[in-house]
Image (tube, rainbow, N blue to C red):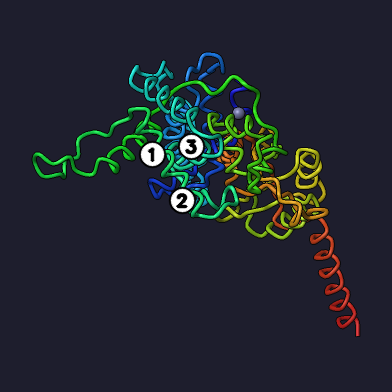
Amino acid sequence: METLNRRHTALLLKHARRFMRATAITVPVADVAREAELILGEMGTRASEVAAPEAAIRDVIRHAVGRVKRRRTLIEQIAAGDDLEAVSRDLAAVDNELPPLLGKPTAEDAAAFETVCRLKRALPPTDALVMALIFDDDFADHEVAALVTRPVSDIAAARERILFTAKELGIEGDADARAPAGMPGDVEKMRELKVKRLAETAAGAGPESAHVEEALLRLLRDGDASDDIADAVMHVALCADCRASLTEGEVERRQVVVVAIEAPPDAGREIEKAATDARAKLVERGEGRWTALVEPSRAASFKGELERDDSSKVSRLAMAEPVDVAVPVPSASNRKPMPSFIDVAFGSGTSGSEVAAWAQVSRERRRRVDSLSPRALGVGLLIVLAVFACIALFATR
Ligand SMILES: [Zn+2]
C-alpha cells in the first residue's frame, strides 16, 4: 500500500488539480490528494493488484473530493461552536465511506490504452511527450509550451504531426453528426476528438522501465530535447507518474502534527505565544477554539507548555498522530535559508487530521481552568493588600 501511495503522490496531486479545474469546486488540491491516499490505504489496495493505476486514481479522486468537502463542513461546524461529540459522530460516517473496489479496466478502455501507446511509440519521443501532455493530460498548447520551455509554434507543429501519424495508423474519428447528409464533415477534427477520447478513457499499466530521475525531469522542464535523453522522454510520454512529476514539480514528504485546543477566549495571547515559541502555525476556529500545526519534534514541548500547571489556561487539548503531507520543493532561487515557521500550510493535507484531533478533544476530560493565571492572581492579591494597607493607614490618622 505504502508503495502505491508514495509512488503516486504527484499523480494524485495532478488528478486532484484536473478534477478541480473541470468542476470549479474549491477545496485545497493537496487535501484531496491526501484524502485519496487515505482512501487507498483504507481499501488496502496493493500496488500489484491495480491493473491500471491512473484509471483507478481518477475514480478515487472523485470520491476523495466528496470526503474533503464533508471534512471541511465539519471544521466549519467546529468553528461555529457546534458540539464536538456530534461532530465526531459525523466524522465516523465520513471515514467509513469507501468507493467500490477498483476492478480491472473494461475491454474498451484497455483497447483505448493499447491504441494510445501504439500512437506514442510511432512518434519521435518529443512529439510523444507533447501528445501525452495535450491529449492524456488535457493541457492547452500554451501550457505545454510553458511546461517544457518551448515556443507555442513548436507545440502546434507537433500536434499536426501527431494527427498525421494517427491517420497513418488508421485511427478514424466517429461520423460527424453536424455534417449535412452525404457529406463527410470535418474528418480531421473528428479524428482529433477521437484521439482525445481514447487518451481520456485509456486504462492500462505504465511502462516497465524505471521511473525517470528528478534531474532528468528538470532538463525536460528546461526544454532539453537532445537525442541522448530520448529513451527518458519516451518513458515520460508513456508514464503517467513521471509526467505528473514533470508537471507538478518536485514535491517532498513532510510530517506535521495537528493540535486542537479548547480554552477560554481570553487565553488567546498565551496560546499565540506558545505557538510562536514552537514555530507552529495557529488558526482560530471560532470562539475558544484553536488549531495548530507543529513539527513532530516540537509537538511535545508545545503541548507541555500549554498544559503547564502554573500557567495553563487550556481546558482541553488533543494531538493527532503525525500526518504525512506533500509540499512543493521550492526552486533554488526562492529557497529560504531557515524558515521561522513550519512551512506546511493548513489545507495541504491536514484537514482530515484536524477533524480527527477535534473528535479526540471531545473525548478528553475538561481541565479546571482558572480565569486568572496564578501570576495574575498574585498581582491581584498584592493590589488588594496595598489597598487595605492604604485604608488602614488613613484610618489610623
Ligand atoms: Zn515513470
What amino acid does circle 2 point to? Answer: Asp
Mark identifier at residue 163? 1
Amino acid type assigned to the residue bearing label 1 in the image = Leu
Q: Which of the two labelled residues, at mark 1 and mark 3, occupies the earlier sequence position?
A: 3
Crowding around mark 1 (Cα neighbors within 10 Å: few <14, some 14 to 19, many 20+) is: some
Could you give the CA–CA distance between mark 1 and mark 2, rounded to whole angstroms?
14 Å
Q: Which residue is mark 2?
A: 141
Q: Position of residue 352 (x, y in %)?
A: 56, 37
Which residue occupies 80% across, 61% down? 376
> In the rendering, at what x and y percent does residue 61 appear?
46, 34
Q: Which mark is residue 132?
A: 3
What is the secondary structure assignment of the residue under circle 1?
Answer: helix
Give the mark nearer the N terminus: 1 vs 2: 2
* Mark 1 and mark 3: Cα distance apart in space: 13 Å
> For residue 355, what is the image quadrant?
top right
The residue under the point 50% across, 27% down is 121
Tag on residue 339?
none
Measured as percent of width and height from the top left, residue 31 is found at: 55, 41
